[in-house]
């Protein structure tokens, strides 16, 4: 898919936007926040979550997940296996860190309500992972790859060939 640093940035921005948008709505639902948070509060939470996710994607989770995925798929030429492995590694890493972020934000807004932070984290992580993996593989992955190849990759290629 992305072959240059610029293309990777565009791909990551689109993917993070979609994933953070839907996961933010999902977590608002889980925390019963829809009736309690203002529209601007929701936008602010989304924007901050998006910024955290894009930084994680570009500088921590993305590079590590791709290294792991490429090692796991080194002996195959099947592109579907490579895409699924990268997606699974990315979702695992992002769910790990974004669940820490979400739990911290929830504690900030609502205070501590659990006796065990570890148990609470494992609960949040598992709920996020269970939704994020199919969301990434079945919905967002294909949509973002379509948008990327239709509007970004072709635009980049056309700009290079016209000059």
Image (spheres, rainbow, N blue to C red):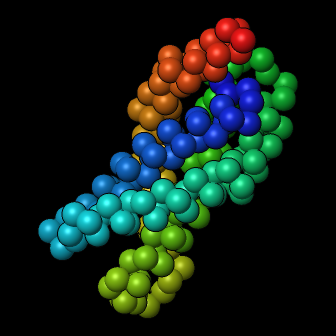
Q: Measuring 25% from the left and 61% from the top, which residue is drawn there?
A: 29
The location of residue 63, given as percent across then percent down, is: 75, 48
- Residue name at image x 63 percent, y 57 percent: 56
Which residue is at a point 74% across and 30% down the rendered structure image? 4
What residue do we see at 63% from left, 12% from top?
158
Residue 79 against residue 86 in the figure, above or below: above
* Label tally: 0
Q: Nearer the viewer, residue 79 or 153?
A: 153
Q: Which quadrant of the rendered structure holds the N terminus?
A: top right
Relative to 88, residue 30 above or below: below
Instruction: State the residue lying farthest toward the top.
Output: 162
Depicted 162 relative to depicted 116: above or below = above
Q: Which residue is the extreme one toward the left?
A: 35
Q: Quadrant of residue 161?
A: top right
Residue 27 visible in the current orientation = no
Q: Quadrant of the C terminus?
A: top right
Pinpoint residue 45: horizontal percent, then vertical percent. Answer: 38, 66
52 or 132: which is nearer to us? 52
Residue 15 visible (yes or no): yes
Near-viewer residue (157 or 146): 157
């Amino acid at each position: 898919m992305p072959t240059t640093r610029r293309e990777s940035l565009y791909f990551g921005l689109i993917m993070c936007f979609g994933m953070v948008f839907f996961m933010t709505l999902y977590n608002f639902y889980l925390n019963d926040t829809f009736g309690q948070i203002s529209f601007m509060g929701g936008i602010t939470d989304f924007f901050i979550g998006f910024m955290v996710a894009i930084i994680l994607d570009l500088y921590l989770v993305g590079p590590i997940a791709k290294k792991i995925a490429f090692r796991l798929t080194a002996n195959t030429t099947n592109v579907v296996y490579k895409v699924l492995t990268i997606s699974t590694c990315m979702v695992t890493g992002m769910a790990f860190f974004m669940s820490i972020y979400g739990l911290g934000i929830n504690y900030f807004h609502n205070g501590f309500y659990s006796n065990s932070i570890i148990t609470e984290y494992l609960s949040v992580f598992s709920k996020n992972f269970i939704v994020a993996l199919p969301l990434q593989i079945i919905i967002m992955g294909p949509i973002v790859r379509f948008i990327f190849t239709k509007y970004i990759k072709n635009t980049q290629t056309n700009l290079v060939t016209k000059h």
